[in-house]
Amino acid sequence: MRLRIVCVGKIREKWLSEGIAEYRKRLSRYCETEIVEVPDSPDSLPDKQIAGREGAAILSRVKSSSVVWLMDLSGETMDSAGFSRELMKGFENGGSEITIVIGGSNGFSDEVIDRADRRIRFSDMTFTHPMSRLILLEQCFRAFKIARGETYHK
């Protein structure tokens, strides 16, 4: 199984980088995890132009055969058990590969939204995009633990 996470922007905080590395290491027991960073656009551009530029960069890194999920404020919420079930189904339906996209602060272009198979969100709260990357990796790790009936803290 392969999990690809396509993200807009880079991680600049050392503590976040360390957390991300830790969860990638934990996930390596269950799947291959790849993080692909695409450049963010300058805030001086109009929002639609930013979304278009970032969208083109995202789509250039998404395989045509991959199941694509967007982390999107307009997406559906689910609990960890539901996320686990849906993630495992996604791997089954996607030829063992899922691409999860974390966009930039200006959202997604229409082209990226049209490419998505599913749109999900963590909660009604807002998280920074770098923090979302860490939370996503932790939830993916938790999803594998749940799916395999292994214990994990609640």
Image: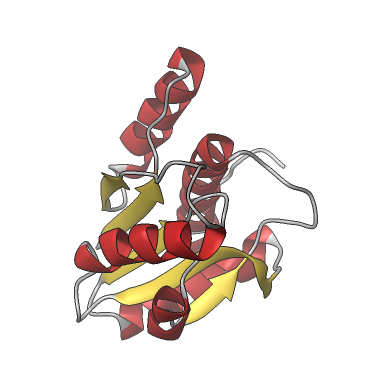
Q: Is residue 91 visible?
A: no
Q: Is residue 78 left or right of residue 55?
A: right
Q: Is residue 1 above or below residue 6?
A: below
Give residue 52's quadrant in the image.
Answer: bottom left
Q: Is residue 81 left or right of residue 24?
A: right
Which one is nearer the viewer's eye here, 83 or 136? Answer: 136
Give residue 146's quadrant in the image.
Answer: bottom right
Query: Extreme right residue here?
Result: 124
* Residue located at (39% from left, 40% from top): 9
* Residue located at (60% from left, 42% from top): 152
Which one is nearer the viewer's eye here, 146 or 84? Answer: 84
Q: How is the image coloured?
A: secondary structure
Task: Point out residue 125 in the picture as x, y percentages from the top left corner.
Answer: 79, 49
Q: Is residue 51 above or below residue 117?
A: above
Which one is nearer the viewer's eye here, 112 or 93? Answer: 112
Quadrant containing the C terminus is top right
Quadrant containing the N terminus is bottom left
Task: Point out residue 5 in the picture as x, y percentages from the top left corner.
Answer: 35, 53
Which one is nearer the viewer's eye here, 88 or 118? Answer: 118
Q: Is residue 18 visible?
A: yes
* Residue located at (34% from left, 65% from top): 99
